[in-house]
Image (spheres, rainbow, N blue to C red):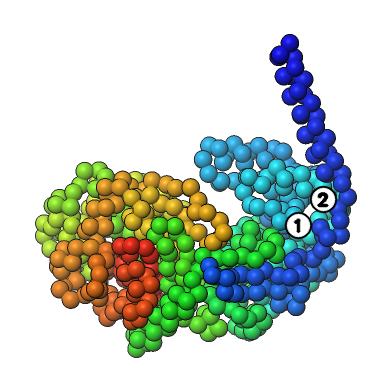
């Protein structure tokens, strides 16, 4: 009897759930559901409530609603080919795609595949739903609701006018204006393909951040258009050869139309480029410290001025709270409105050089190596698929048998490669990926032993956040930008707590680094620091924080300085903060 009652109750609950879902889907959409984007715009503030940026939708500077009938047909075709090839044939949801994505994500224990149709993406943007699988059930119901009450063209118009496309551009019209100085009605085939390619990761792939990634995404969209026979082979080839670089006048126009106040422009642009940040008009209170941001901006400008005689033109910096991962300051360039100033070097990818060595040593410490282990700093070569590999130290000298402590603190190259060879590049690469270097996507064979010396492109934000793992017992945690969201419980064990502590101990040993850097270095602070230095001549002096106030506010942290992302210096704050920055020489 109890079993029958339980079955009856379960049946009734299921029926009620199905009925409620059906009622929701059939309930008519209101006009407020479909109004063009948030009319009040998005207000972004720092952690104390000071306004950083107001992105208004009403003046057209970052948003303009355009009718689907006025859009260039290639634009529609490119988005459908790239985002949802079966858009006009399904009813809002692709069950097989959802099942496949769920399987892939469960097997990988993380999100590696999505299954969102254009209808589902439009539903998320219309309803202001969160990204990720937690919001999928509501997203599915909203997609079915849109399909029940709108035509396919109406759904596509909602999506193309709401989709975030990087640098704060919402919708295809504002993105076309920003990147090409064009309109959605007259973009070329190549431009249409590029915009469609941005939808998946707009803040990372847009041409102001990376021309290479933007070009790759455009090529992918063009290949999919070719597969659908939308254009001839010659048209596809011509479109793929179009320049990706954003016209200077477009950058200037975009910069001049931004709404004041506008501090931390790279940070707020990156934030607005994230799809989940612009899905509603609710204010966003970030973790940024505006006072500290201003101080760091001054330091970045000063660094470029000091190194101008060495042709240094660009620099960037990011400050993180070691404990929480809060982004406290984010400076992507010395001058946002200067030539190339909107290129955000905090998220741009460069080779980090010796900044990856501590992760090699940390893994070695977990495998039995100690700080007293003797390593050979003696010239040798390795046979690789691409030929003979013979690393050399920065000073072009060999130091003979050295202890691991001295080899790491003095940043000798040969011992680091020796350890990487003993550990195996797959193990080293896995450790780096666990430390948050998601940009290292190639195979171990692609990177080879040079990975120990930084032969792999990473971003400054990845690098600085990876170093937080050493201050948190060998555990990596993501950064936090929303001050009203508690720090995530998500974490990855990179190395043991003992290995992390030993790395910090070595990097804070001023005696151990004498062999590589001499007795006088830029690390002579009035407080202890753990530093990862590299021979960088006078550029090392840019690691100094001129202002005593900022030094105190950073709780004794320093700064990472780079030339061409090959000469690196990192300080670890003993109490609170991790700071990283870079200076770049123009590449000949």
Residue 140, image x, y percentages:
74, 44
* Closer-to-camera residue (2/472): 2
Task: Identify the residue position indicated by label 1 in the image.
Answer: 126
Outermost residue on the top side: it is 1
Q: Are marks 2 and 1 in contact (CB under 8 Å)?
A: yes
Image disc number at residue 224: none
Q: Is residue 91 left or right of residue 529?
A: right
> What kind of element bears circle 2?
helix
* CA neighbours of label 2 inside 10 A, class few (<14), some (14 to 19), many (20+): many
- Residue for point 36% across, 53% down: 472
Instruction: Determine the CA span between mark 2 and mark 1.
Output: 10 Å
* Closer-to-camera residue (131/231): 131
- Residue for point 50% across, 82% down: 335
Rendered view: 247 above or below 35: below
Task: Identify the residue position indicated by label 2 in the image.
Answer: 146
Rendered view: 296 above or below 164: below
Q: Is residue 173 left or right of residue 147?
A: left
> What kind of element bears circle 1?
helix
């Amino acid at each position: 009897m109890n079993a029958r009652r339980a079955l009856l109750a379960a049946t009734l609950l299921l029926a009620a759930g199905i009925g409620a879902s059906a009622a929701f889907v059939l309930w008519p959409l209101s006009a407020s559901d479909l109004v063009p984007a948030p009319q009040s715009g998005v207000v972004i503030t720092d952690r104390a409530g000071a306004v950083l940026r107001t992105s208004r939708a009403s003046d057209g500077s970052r948003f303009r609603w355009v009718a689907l009938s006025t859009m260039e047909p290639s634009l529609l075709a490119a988005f459908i080919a790239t985002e949802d090839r079966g858009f006009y044939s399904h009813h809002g949801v692709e069950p097989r795609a959802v099942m496949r994505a769920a399987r892939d994500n469960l097997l990988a224990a993380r999100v590696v595949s999505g299954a969102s149709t254009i209808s589902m993406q439009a539903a998320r943007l219309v309803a202001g739903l969160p990204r990720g699988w937690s919001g999928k059930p509501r997203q599915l119901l909203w997609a079915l609701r849109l399909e029940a009450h709108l035509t396919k063209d109406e759904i596509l118009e909602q999506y193309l006018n709401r989709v975030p496309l990087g640098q704060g551009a919402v919708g295809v019209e504002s993105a076309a204006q920003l990147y090409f100085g064009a309109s959605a009605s007259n973009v070329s085939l190549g431009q249409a393909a590029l915009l469609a390619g941005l939808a998946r990761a707009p803040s990372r792939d847009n041409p102001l951040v990376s021309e290479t990634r933007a070009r790759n995404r455009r090529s992918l969209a063009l290949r999919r258009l070719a597969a659908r026979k939308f254009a001839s082979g010659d048209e596809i080839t011509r479109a793929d050869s179009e320049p990706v670089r954003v016209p200077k006048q477009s950058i200037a126009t975009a910069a001049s139309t931004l709404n004041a106040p506008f501090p931390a422009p790279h940070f707020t642009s990156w934030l607005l480029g994230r799809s989940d940040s612009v899905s509603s008009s609710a204010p966003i209170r970030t973790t940024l410290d505006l006072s500290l941001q201003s101080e760091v901006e001054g330091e970045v400008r000063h660094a470029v001025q000091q190194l101008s005689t060495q042709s240094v033109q660009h620099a960037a910096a990011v400050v993180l709270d070691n404990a929480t991962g809060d982004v406290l300051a984010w400076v992507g360039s010395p001058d946002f409105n200067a030539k190339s100033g909107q290129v955000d070097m905090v998220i741009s990818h460069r080779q980090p050089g010796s900044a990856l060595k501590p992760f090699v040593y940390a893994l070695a410490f977990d495998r039995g190596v100690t700080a007293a282990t003797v390593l050979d700093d003696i010239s040798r070569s390795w046979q690789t698929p691409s030929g003979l590999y013979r690393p050399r130290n920065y000073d072009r000298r060999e130091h003979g048998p050295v202890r691991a402590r001295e080899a790491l603190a003095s940043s000798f190259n040969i011992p680091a490669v020796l350890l990487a060879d003993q550990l195996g590049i797959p193990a080293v690469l896995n450790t780096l990926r666990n430390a948050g270097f998601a940009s290292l996507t190639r195979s171990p064979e692609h990177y080879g032993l040079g990975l120990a010396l930084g032969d792999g492109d990473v971003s400054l934000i990845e690098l600085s956040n990876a170093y937080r793992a050493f201050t948190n017992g060998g555990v990596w945690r993501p950064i936090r930008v929303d001050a009203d969201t508690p720090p995530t419980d998500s974490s990855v064990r990179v190395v043991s707590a003992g290995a992390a502590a030993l790395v910090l101990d070595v990097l804070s040993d001023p005696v151990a680094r004498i062999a590589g850097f001499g007795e006088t270095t830029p690390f002579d602070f009035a407080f202890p620091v753990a530093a990862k230095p590299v021979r960088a001549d006078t550029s090392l002096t840019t690691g100094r924080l001129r202002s005593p106030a900022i030094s105190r506010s950073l709780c004794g942290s320093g700064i990472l300085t780079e030339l061409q992302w090959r000469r690196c210096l990192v300080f670890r704050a003993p109490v609170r903060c991790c700071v990283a920055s870079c200076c770049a020489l123009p590449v000949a």
